[in-house]
Image (cartoon, coloured by chain):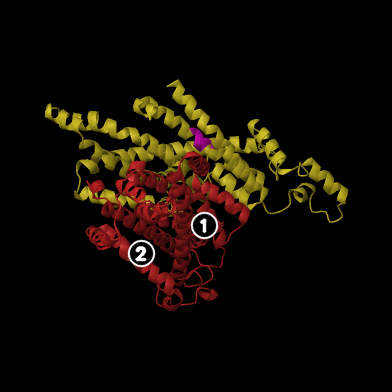
Amino acid sequence: MERKEEVEEVPRGELRTLLRNLRRSRTATFGLIYVIALVIVAILAPIISPFDPYAQDLQNRLQPPSFPHILGLDEFGRDVLTRLIHGATVSMQVGLEVVLLSLLIGVVVGAISGYYGGWADMVCMRIADIFLAFPSLVLAIGIMAVLGPSIFNVVLSLVIVSWPYYARVIRSQTITLKKMDFITAAIAMGASKKRILFTHIIPNAIPPVIILATLGMGSAILAEAGLSFLGLGVNPPIPSWGSMVASGRDYILQAPHIVISSGLVITITVLAFNLLGDGLRDALDPRLRI
Amino acid sequence: MLAYIFKRLAMVIPVFLGVSVIVFVIMLNTPGDPVLVRIGLDPNVSPEKIEAARRELGLDQPIYIQYFKFLVRLVQGDLGNNIRTGRPVAQDIMEAFPRTLILAVTSILLAIAIGIPAGILSAKKQYSAFDSITSVGSLLAASMPNFWLALVLIMVFSYWLKLTPLSGYGEPAHLILPTIALGTALAGTITRFTRSNMLEVIRQDFIRTAKAKGLKESVVTFKHALKNALIPIVTVIGLQFGTLLSGAFFVEVVFAYPGIGRLAVQAILQKNYTVVQGAILVVSISFVLINLLIDIIYAYIDPRVQYE
């Protein structure tokens, strides 16, 4: 498995080549465009959404899709499209925070583990093993059960369960890089250990992790939706895709549009991140494209 | 082989200890005072009574002693009592967990039945229309939230077509929709993995040799390529077992299927923390044990592993 995650490094000047490689794949291009669009929607949510996400119209609750409510109204008569748009902000926020924080912990732990080896490596990796021993969502559910629902707690619980994956990949990258000639050259030139680690190893270990981070965005968004679906994620009435599926569940016969639209948005979003991640893997490492 | 098994077993013990520490720490922080839960919400309770209850629950002792006692009880199979019913938690779990395992096994079987043939065909016909559709389809399957798929299945097959029971447990028909909801993502993962492994294997020298010998295409595909491509899939299924157990927490809730996932989620909503703790421990430990078993099977099928 680990061998698959190892990908050749891409020097910074090759970003353009990377994008060109990415554009060759239609599915990856779709993923990229969707993700960019979603980021814009998430940032501009208050401006572009047609209605107030909290405004209730109890007379017309559960109204099916029609003009001007293109995706209909929910059980409190709130506009579904508006709530999906605001839900994008929550999903992207959770996804980004989870990925960046896990990446930060993963880089620190993985680089120390891989570079220094010995007992530091031993301790770090045994700790990672313990966290990996839990089915990750089960651990997240347990943590949320104790902490109680909130966006901050969702991020915290998902970081706790996802950092070991990043640490492992960074560690194996570091071990591979450590043996390379340019590191030997740097040592020969008298570079300090700290300098080698921060200016040579870490920057070169990052590109393969970009793939993992992209796929991680998808899993974090899926996990947040799941926790919110169980009532353990984002607190109502804050719009979250997962809690929209949960509340639509009670009206699945009278108003299937709530469950269908919110679930589709989750699916397409996660799919887009997965397609982009796959495309990045192919673009970063042509060997794997076969 | 025996040495390898012992080595793997020795590696599992610290992991178990670590898992127990983490679960213990999480549960130390449960909201609500276990002492008050024990003696009820009597406003006139005397300080002596509170003190007695604290002592009874062992809460007057230092944390490491509390942990040690927790560990000793755990090894004896004592997971404490259900706060609401007073029944031993172990009994609740013994009832619910086999049902989850049944669901997990049917889901794995479904995923294998779809994923392996689809993956082989996709690899054999690389870059064909079938391959592209399978590639996107398998990724789509893995991207769908299983709780949503479960609801859509209920909507279509139970409400509209009236083919399957809505929810519940007892008859084989009750397993159909939960199995599809839980197995779909795994089917996608297995398809992708089979495809990429087959592609890797068919490019190797021994396959060229087999073809050069004039063996039939089907013999090369099934006897030479597939056999080698399938070995790593065993590991993937083991690793995915965790995802499957997590998934059961959602699918069981939607279908009111009385497994360990529904037990745990209901317990969380009722603040019944001993049950939550027991469920998380049992699910995690079984995940570790299953991976241990798979590692040993793997080493048996592929002796190279033992020397790494």
Circle 1 packing at 10 Å, graded few (<14), some (14-19), many (20+), is many
* Tag 2 subunit: A
Q: Return the residue at label 1.
A: A229
Picture residue at 41% right of the left edge, 50% below the top: B157
- A166 lies above or below A28: above
Q: Amino acid at mark 1?
A: Phe
Farthest top residue in view: B2
B186 or A178, nearer to the observer: A178
- SS at circle 2: helix
B126 or A6, nearer to the observer: A6
- Asked if residue B55 lies left or right of residue A45, the reply is right
* Residue A123 horizontal/vertical position (percent): 52, 41
- A127 lies above or below A194: above
Q: Amino acid at mark 2?
A: Val
* Apparent colour of chain B: yellow
* Residue A202 horizontal/vertical position (percent): 39, 53
- SS at circle 1: helix
Residue A71 appears anywhere in the view: no
Q: CA distance from mark 1 to mark 2?
A: 23 Å
- Asked if residue A262 lies left or right of residue A146, the reply is left
Question: What segment carries the magenta color?
Answer: B285-289
